[in-house]
Structures are given as C-alpha cells and as structure tokens.
Image: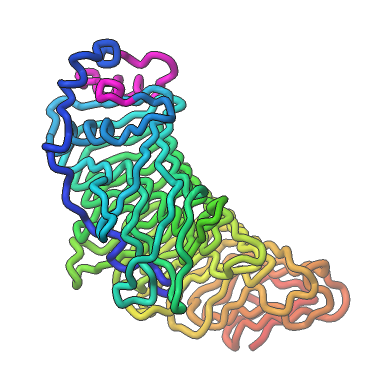
C-alpha cells in the first residue's frame, strides 16, 4: 500500500520472452525417452487423475520427457525452459497436461538483468498460451537457487535501493488463459541468501523475485500449492496494465516470504478460498524483511485514468487464514481511486502481540469483512486510512457478524469522514487492567454501530472510568455488559444515542 513504502512499477516490469532458438525442441528429447514419455500417473498423483477426468481427450505428458530429473541436484533450468517453450504461443484444441512425478526439481540459477556481470538466465515464462495444465504429483518440489548475494545496484532516483539480481521465477504466467497450476511446493531458499545493507538512509525495494507471477491472465486456477521463502513475494497477481480476470486460488499456503505473501496489482473477479497467508517478513536466515511485509496486499499500480484496463476489484477471500505476518495481515486502500469491492468472509485474521498496529486496513468502497474471527492482538482494524489518492467519502467499509478479540483498540476510526458500518459483531477483551487506550476507539467515520455485543470485564479493565469511545450518529440495539458491582464504566457515544435504544448494564454510563 502506498502509505507503507510499497514498490513502484519496478516490481512488475515485463521482460522479453525467451527466444525459441534457445530451447531444444521436446521431440529431440522424447525420442530417446520412451519410458518417461509414456509414463502415466505412476505412484501417488491424485491431481493428475482429477485432471484426466476433467479432460478425457487431453494430451498427457510427463515432465521427465523434457529432460527433468527430479533428483534435487541436477540444474533443471534448461528442461524447464523446454516445457515453457513447448506450451507458450499455443492455443491447444485438446487440453495439454504436463505432470511432474514426485521429486525435487532444482533450478541452480539466478537472473542478473544488467551490468558488467549480467547473465543470460531468464524466468520460466508460460506466455500467450491457452488450455493447459501443469500438475505436481504428491512430493513434487521446485527448489530455486537461494545461496547467493543480492547487491544494491541503483536507486532509480527513489528513496530505495534496487538490485539487478533476481531469484529465478519458475511460474511466470503472461497473457495466458484457461490454465491450471496445481500440486507443487515451490521453495525460493531465501534463508540461504544475503543482501547488501542499504546505505545513505535509503530502504530496500525488491526486484522480480517471486514464486509465481501472473500478468494479463484470464480464467485460470492455482491450487494445492505451497510457495515460500522468496526474496520478494510468494505470489504477485496482475502485473500489467491489463488486469487479470477470473483467477481462482484454492488451498494455497504462502509463507516466510520477505516482502509480501501475496500482492494483487491489477485484477478483477479474483477469488481465494481455503488458503493461508502467514509469517511474511520472517525469512529464517540473514536476508532482511522490509515493508510492507503483509500477508496480502491489494495494491494496484494503476487506475483507469492512468492506463489500467479496469479498476482492481470484485475480489473475495473465503475461508482463509491470515496470521503472524510482520506487517499488516491484510491491507488494501486507494479510497476508491484504484480498488473497490473487496470481501473477506468466514476467515481467520490473527495479529502479532506487540507487532504492527495496523492489523487490517480496508479503505475501499464496498469493502466487507464478515462472519470472521479477528484477533487484533495489541493492534486494531482500520476500516479507512488516509492516503494521497481517492476520496475518503467513498469508503463505506462494513464489519458485520465478526468476533473481534483484542488486547488493543480492536477498531480504530478517527478524524476522517468515511461511511463505515459496524454491526452484529461480538467484541472480546483480552486487555491487561493497565491498558490505557479505548476499546473500541471510534470518534469519526463510522455512521452506524448497531447490534454489537461488548463486555467490559473487571479482570480486563479494573477500576478505570473512561474505557471506550463509540461516537457515531446511529447507535442502537447494542448490548454493553459488565460484571462491575461498584462505580461505573463510561462509554463515550456522542450526544445523539439513547440508552433506551440499547441494552446496557447498570454500571455502564453512556454520554458525550
């Protein structure tokens, strides 16, 4: 997000395709590899069987036919490029399925784009193709070289250092459609990497070190994946002005990546289900983390007025888990300029005790968090956020039906004229009696606080007086309870709300 040193367009530069002359045709390899070429599912490959059921007329080929070994030692770079070249620039009439038997497929290369020590290594690009599947059998691991040093090469006249060196991306899906990538563990090995310390008071901005990148892709599925330990993002979605359309991510686990778990740049009609985004910013080695370090960041680089094909939006997270990320667990903003219509439902969001206070930022029109369990730890949910773009008056985030657990503010809304609705939530305190702020802390920007339940237990709030600010014009059907039996807790609700419109314990007073 712009307010947290998010990358500029440098993170999504589209490089030229690998020339076809660099790739040995697959027929040259398959001719002497009849066993590999004719291999069927062999062993444990349930996802391949499902794919065959979906596409009974498909062409099915083992990745071993392209020269892959899967022994964890051989540099598989050239064989991966053969697969990508065989699929790219083709619109298959019959589904093309390439499956990877159990094994570790090691790519012992990194990309160095320019400078005196530039190399000729390229990312593995599946470009301008349609109607294909890449399927990992149980135990299929793609391991990318991580034991190298990433220097600082240029600042590009920005406050950050950029490197021309990148981890090699094994899944760069460009302008392709109707594809499925499923069943792989992808390990970037950033725990073995080092990075030159930034100088001159500048920060670090990452190059294209991603476990997967999509760009102008349509109608695709990524499922049953683990993507971890990359120097930038586990997954970057929608890397060009032409938005991805119709992407589905199911049962993915993204963890221990340095910059972001998942970045969504330009995308519409996107859905994540039964997925986990965790431990971003913790690389398990010497390689540093850096902002934003979020589990998921929906952060477009462009809007329709700056060349985007569509405003990023209509994005759903269903039955997902966001946990223990160094930055926000989930963040999106733009106040209507770049993003709209984001929904999180039936999910779990877990902040870090003593960690980043902005546990969730949802500063968009038609933003919804519903029926979820949210533990903000010592931080809070920010249903709107001041930015340099958009209009805060367009932000109408809805928080409804959630259980909001906190030892901090729970919700923070102040100073700006948004139109947030907070309804039918249950607030649960985990505060120490020495807590000195408010729970929740709402002074402006929320237009309705209704049907919520808040319990103020003396074990959490002691003998304090002023414990909560919920200043909203529409305050009704709320239940405020306490086990206090002497004195009163005071909740500031403004001048309009009436006690009679709510259920409030005797030892709680409300007022301005």
Q: Is residue 441 above or below residue 289?
A: below
**Residue placed furthest toward the right:** 486
Decide if residue 247 is on the left or right side of residue 306: right
Viewer-closest of 483 and 51: 51
Tell me, yes or no, if residue 286 can be seen here.
yes
Q: Nearer the viewer, residue 438 or 189?
A: 189
Q: Quadrant of residue 303?
A: bottom left
Q: Residue 480 placed where, x, y %? A: 70, 70
- The quadrant of the picture occupied by the N terminus is bottom left
Query: Is any part of residue 4 visible from this angle?
Result: no
Residue 63 lies in magenta, yes or no? yes
Depicted 59 relative to depicted 502: above or below? above
How many numbered circles does the render carry?
0
Where 155 falls versus 471 (above or below)?
above
For the point 68% across and 67% down, the residue is: 454
- Tell me residue 416's x, y (percent): 46, 83
Picture residue at 16% right of the left edge, 21% below the top: 28
- Which residue shows up at 18% across the image and 61% down it? 309
Magenta range: 39-68
Residue at 21% across, 51% down: 216
Q: Is residue 125 magenta?
A: no
Q: Position of residue 196 (x, y in %)?
A: 45, 63
Extreme residue toward the front, this view:
116
**Residue in the foreground of this view, choosing between 444 and 27:** 27
Q: Quadrant of residue 165?
A: bottom left
**Which of the image's four quarters has the C terminus?**
bottom right
Corner quadrant of residue 326: bottom right
């Amino acid at each position: 997000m712009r307010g947290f040193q998010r990358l500029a367009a440098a993170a999504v530069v589209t490089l030229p395709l690998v020339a076809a002359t660099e790739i040995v045709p697959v027929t040259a390899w398959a001719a002497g590899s009849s066993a590999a070429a004719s291999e069927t599912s062999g062993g444990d490959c349930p996802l391949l069987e499902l794919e065959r059921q979906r596409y009974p007329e498909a062409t099915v080929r083992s990745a071993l036919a392209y020269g892959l070994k899967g022994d964890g030692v051989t540099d598989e770079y050239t064989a991966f490029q053969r697969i990508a070249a065989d699929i790219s620039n083709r619109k298959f009439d019959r589904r093309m399925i390439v499956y990877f038997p159990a094994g570790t497929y090691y790519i012992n290369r990194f990309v160095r784009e320019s400078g005196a020590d530039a190399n000729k290594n390229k990312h593995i690009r599946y470009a301008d193709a349609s109607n294909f599947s890449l399927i990992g059998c149980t135990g299929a691991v793609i391991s990318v070289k991580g034991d190298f040093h990433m220097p600082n090469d240029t600042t590009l006249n920005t406050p950050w250092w950029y490197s021309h060196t990148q981890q090699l991306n094994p899944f760069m899906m460009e302008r392709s459609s109707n594809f499925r990538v499923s069943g792989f563990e992808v390990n970037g090995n950033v725990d073995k990497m080092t990075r030159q310390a930034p100088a001159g008071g500048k920060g670090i901005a990452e190059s294209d070190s991603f476990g997967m990148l999509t760009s102008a892709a349509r109608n695709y599925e990524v499922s049953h994946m683990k993507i971890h330990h990359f120097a930038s993002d586990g997954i970057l979605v929608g890397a060009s002005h032409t938005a991805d359309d119709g992407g589905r991510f199911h049962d993915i686990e993204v963890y221990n990546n340095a910059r972001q778990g998942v970045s969504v740049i330009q995308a519409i009609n996107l859905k994540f289900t039964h997925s986990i985004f965790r431990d971003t910013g913790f690389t398990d080695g010497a390689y540093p983390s850096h902002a934003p370090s979020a589990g998921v960041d929906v952060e477009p680089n462009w809007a329709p007025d700056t060349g985007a094909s569509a405003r990023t939006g209509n994005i759903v997270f269903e039955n997902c888990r966001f946990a223990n990320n160094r930055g926000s667990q989930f963040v999106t903003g733009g106040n209507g300029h770049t993003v709209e219509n984001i929904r999180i439902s039936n999910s779990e969001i877990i902040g870090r005790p003593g960690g980043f206070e902005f546990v969730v930022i949802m500063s968009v029109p038609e933003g919804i968090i519903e029926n979820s369990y949210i533990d903000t730890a010592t931080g809070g949910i920010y249903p709107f956020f001041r930015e340099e773009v958009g209009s805060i008056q367009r932000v109408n985030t809805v928080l409804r039906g959630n259980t909001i657990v906190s030892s901090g503010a729970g919700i923070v809304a102040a100073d700006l004229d948004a139109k947030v609705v907070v309804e039918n939530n249950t607030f649960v305190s985990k505060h120490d009696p020495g807590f000195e702020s408010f729970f929740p802390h709402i002074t402006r920007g929320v237009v309705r606080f209704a049907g919520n339940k808040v319990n103020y237990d003396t074990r959490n709030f002691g003998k304090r007086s002023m414990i909560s600010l919920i200043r909203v014009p529409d305050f009704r059907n709320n239940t405020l309870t306490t086990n206090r039996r002497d004195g009163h807790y005071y909740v500031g609700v403004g001048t309009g709300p009436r006690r009679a419109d709510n259920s409030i314990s005797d030892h709680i007073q409300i007022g301005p």
